[in-house]
Amino acid sequence: MKMYLARRNFLQLTAAATAMPAAARRAHAQAYPSRSITIVVPFPPGGSTDVVARIMAEHMRPLLGQAIVIENVGGAGGSIALGRVARASPDGYTIDLGQWDTHVGGIIYALNVDLERDFEPIGLISINPQLMVGRKTLPADDLKGLVAFIRANPGKVTLVSQTAAAQLSGLMLQRLTGAEVALIPYRGAGPALTDLLSGQVDLMVAQAAVLMPHVRAGAVKAIANLSPRRSEALPDIATSDESGVPGLYASGWFGFFAPRGTPKAAITALNGAMRQALREQAVRARFTELGLDIAAPEQQSAEALAAFHKAETEKWWPIIRSANVKAE
């Protein structure tokens, strides 16, 4: 009897010891996040992408119970940052704040990542109105007047080309109107905006978050919101359809992405914190101040961002390729 009990105890202990690693693994998986999370921002500090990342980090941090670190990885229009994220461990601890210029317009660069397959969508944060603005002394107040001015000065009106979206907007303006503008390459929105404010260039297309402080101050004039419909955050700025050039659209948005293969539990936790943060009044007020429209609740899921991103690539990649937009 003693030998039987000893053997039974031994087998029970052995079974328990064998089960422990699996239990430990389950506990570890359930504990996400158990350490700090890094949001990779694909542009230098100070721009609208950086500002939005810091707003989201501040409000998601208490919801996730872990520190959120912002890592600015600039260069090559954000493509260096995309490589950093795609090669990171797919464990939910490294994500990026993606946008049109990186996850759609990024094809103008020699990428070492696959924009369709190397990332897991987490959630869509905002729809970002793209504004066309002019120097404050520009003798045009809307697109109709601008086209007339460009036609009177063919090849002399300058539009800065600091992103793929800006370059594409200039090319589309020419195609839709036959009015010839001079596209001037810039390495970033900062230098381009400096020259616009000083009157050295005539036109700029960028996110409202970058331009609205200067529009409100009267330092530049808003020509049009390059969107099919007016922005809730900027209801007083007419769309391109309303102001004289129907169909002149430029897409802008922010969304979180993780490396391909990131566990569903991590995606769900990050998405939940993102969505809860977007419901906070302080975040909504800050986004309105920046001129950003928070994505509708039904657009905020990981599945909705996947569908949205697919639609964006299918819409814009043929246009980019036919226009032969290249990195400059």
Image (tube, grey):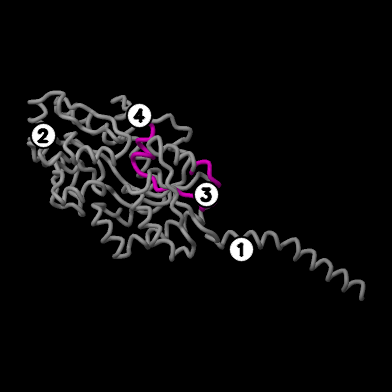
Name the amino acid, label 1: Ala
User: Who's the residue at 31% across and 24% down the image?
Assistant: 324
Cα separation, mark 2 vs mark 3, equals 48 Å
Cα separation, mark 2 vs mark 1, equals 62 Å
Q: Label 1's element?
A: helix
From the viewer's side, name the closer residue of 272 and 7: 272
From what the image shows, is residue 15 above or below residue 50? below
Name the residue carrying label 2: 146
Name the residue carrying label 3: 262
Instruction: Looking at the image, tell me whether mark 3 or mark 4 is earlier in sequence order.
Output: 3
| Residue 150, position as x, y percentages in the image | 11, 28
The tag on residue 27 is: 1
User: Who's the residue at 37% across and 42% down the image?
Assistant: 309
Cα separation, mark 2 vs mark 4, equals 26 Å
- 182 vs 47, left or right, is left
Name the residue carrying label 4: 327
Q: Which of marks 2 and 3 is in front?
A: 2
- 36 vs 174, left or right, is right
| Residue 57, position as x, y percentages in the image | 40, 58
Quarter of the N terminus within the rendering: bottom right
Q: Label 2's element?
A: helix
Cα separation, mark 1 vs mark 3, equals 17 Å
Q: What stretch is highlighted in magenta?
A: 85-108
Q: Label 4's element?
A: loop
Name the amino acid, label 3: Thr
Q: Label 3's element?
A: loop
